[in-house]
Amino acid sequence: MGKKTYYADVNDTDITVNNGKKDLLDKVFKLLESRGFKIQTDQRILKEHPILADTHWEGSKGDLQFKSHIYPAGFDIKFFQEVVAENRYGGYYDFDKLEKMPYLIKCEFLITSKHICSLLESEGYSNRAEPSFKYALDKVMYKIKSCWHYKEGKELPNYEFPSYNAKDRDDKQIYNGQTKYFRDRKGRLKRGIVYHNINNMWWVILNKKDYTNVGAYELFDLTTREDRIPKIYNREIPYRVKVEKARSRFNKEFSYSMLKEIHINYLRLLVSQELIDHDKEINMSLKTPLKKDTAILKTKGLKYAAINVNGSYFSNREGITFNQDGFIGFAGWASGYNLKPFVDAFEKWMDWLQETSKQVA
């Protein structure tokens, strides 16, 4: 039997219960009804998918609403409101639901959520969401101690890390609690107190409230005058701007309908070539493609395609994605610097497509 846990984040309006059964959900509904909620079968589901009607519910108290769904692994309750909604289909589909809630509706939700959590904990369930902390040091210590690879004392200054994970830019050993410097994406000099995260990544506490995550190879001490001098502004076009230009060019000159498997495979080849000479620290390489990564229809051309990559501390991240809705994604996880191989490969690929089209014509 799985663990009895639920997830209720302080910044979210969803409550998800793992291994929760119908009898527990009935207790939650009884609690909500005692607090003035009116609950019924989800009317949209009843109309459009009647076979699922006995597993979907909706309820409301004033302007605070919720939808609930039970499934084999548990159930969830999603609260929302329609007073302030951005999504054209309603507040249920909005992001940042809690942030958008008007004050009184938010107060009602917070009280209701507290009562539901108390009920779940009285039934032996524990919340697996991260607790809320006021200060950056407390947040970092929680992340260190709750990580799966934590060992006793890992957060202490005298804890020893493998040298390949704890050498700074100048090949100096890094220890917890040291003050180190680094430069942000705009070249500005930053400093903070460092604590080891995972692999060669380090948490850097910048001040009481703020912290960030920096690679060991980006950290250094102020030992030379050059380190103190601000970097000259880089006038090269930022790669996020190049991404937009690449998308725009593709939409003007090409289309999904003209793309075949040979075209996607050639793009994979170009990406692979660009990655060879990219940053050796991150050491990205092309992930071996699977059949499900690409779908091409005989008459309509490309439906979707995904080119993913592995790195020194991650696997199966987005490189270039041709989404079904026509949007082309470029390494949404990456900084401007790590976008470079994907954008450069894509631009070379479009040049090749252009020449190929001329030859066929």
Image (cartoon, grey):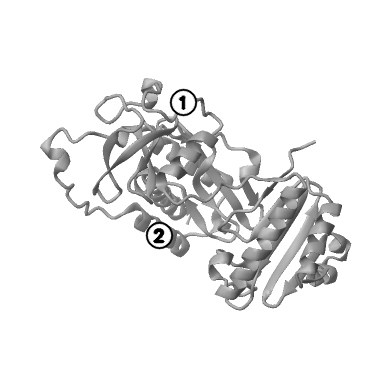
Residue tagged by mark 1? 153
Specify whether 12 is left or right of 310. right
Residue labelled with disc 2: 244
Q: Position of residue 354 (x, y in %)?
A: 42, 54
Tell me, for residue 198, which label it has, or none. Answer: none
Vertically, is 65 above or below 161? Answer: below
Q: Quadrant of residue 220?
A: top left
Residue lying furthest left: 225
Residue count near mark 2 (Cα–Cα under 10 Å), binned few <14, some 14–19, many ≥20? some
Which residue is found at the position 58% from the left and 37% from the top? 289
285 over 97 or under it: above or below: above
- Local secondary structure at mark 2: helix
Instruction: Give the alpha-carbon distance from disc 1 to disc 2, as whole Å.
Output: 46 Å
- Give left or right: position of 40 versus 87: right
Closer to the camera in the image, 321 or 203: 203
Tell me what residue is drawn at x 57 percent, y 65 percent.
98
Q: Secondary structure at mark 1?
A: loop
Residue under the image location 80 percent in, 55 percent down: 70
Residue 27 in picture, x, y percent from top left:
82, 57
> In terms of sequence position, does the residue under pointer 1 or pointer 2 come before the other?
1
For the question of whether residue 102 can be seen, the reply is no
In the image, residue 13 lies at what x, y percent? 63, 61
